[in-house]
Image: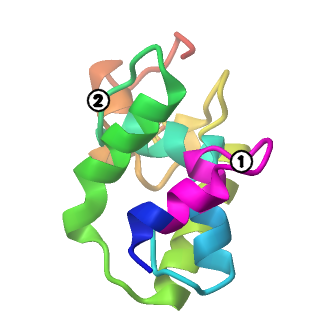
Amino acid sequence: MPVARARRLLRRFPGIGEPGADKVLLFSRTQPVFALDSNGLRTLLRLGYGREVKSYPATYRSVLAAIEDELSDDFDGLTRAYLLLRRHGQGLCRRTSPVCEACPLAPDCGYWLNAGGRVTATS
Ligand code: SF4
């Protein structure tokens, strides 16, 4: 089944949005799609992928579109990426007070570089 149709069918279930549908497809190993929770999404946005807009689904799609050329269709790799980005967002790239000073991604991070290497604002 094409990915777009699978997403549409899953989104008929209550509480399942596009990110949730992608997670179901990935973790059930039905479709090798990239999925992100809010922690992973925030991390990739700060690193410079996509654009944050008012609509969460639009932001989600923007980040996916920005990173798609860098992804493989390997289930294990995509699953690892989901879990690592989630963990990174929970531990270091927190919504408020990210711990950039301890982040190995800081030299390549737009958020960090735009803040002049000193993060004082939250987003
Ligand atoms: S440097 Fe800071 S904002 Fe950038 S990814 Fe690391 S923790 Fe997140």
Q: Position of residue 20 (x, y in %)?
A: 66, 53
Specify the quadrant of the image occupied by residue 96: top right
Residue at 52% x, 67% y is 6
Residue at 57% x, 14% y is 122
Extent of the magenta region:
6-21
- Residue 92 in sight: no
Q: Which mark is residue 16?
A: 1
Q: Quadrant of the N terminus?
A: bottom left
Residue 12 among magenta residues: yes
Q: Nearer the viewer, residue 39 or 98?
A: 39
Is 58 located above or below residue 13 in the figure? above
Identify residue for label 2: 113
- Residue 67 in sight: yes
Q: Could you tell whether 62 is left or right of 80 in the image?
A: left
Type of residue at label 2? Leu
Residue 77 among magenta residues: no
What SS does tag 2 mark?
A: helix
Residue furthest left in the image: 69
Q: Which mark is residue 84?
A: none
Q: Could you tell whether 44 is left or right of 18 in the image?
A: left
Type of residue at label 1? Ile
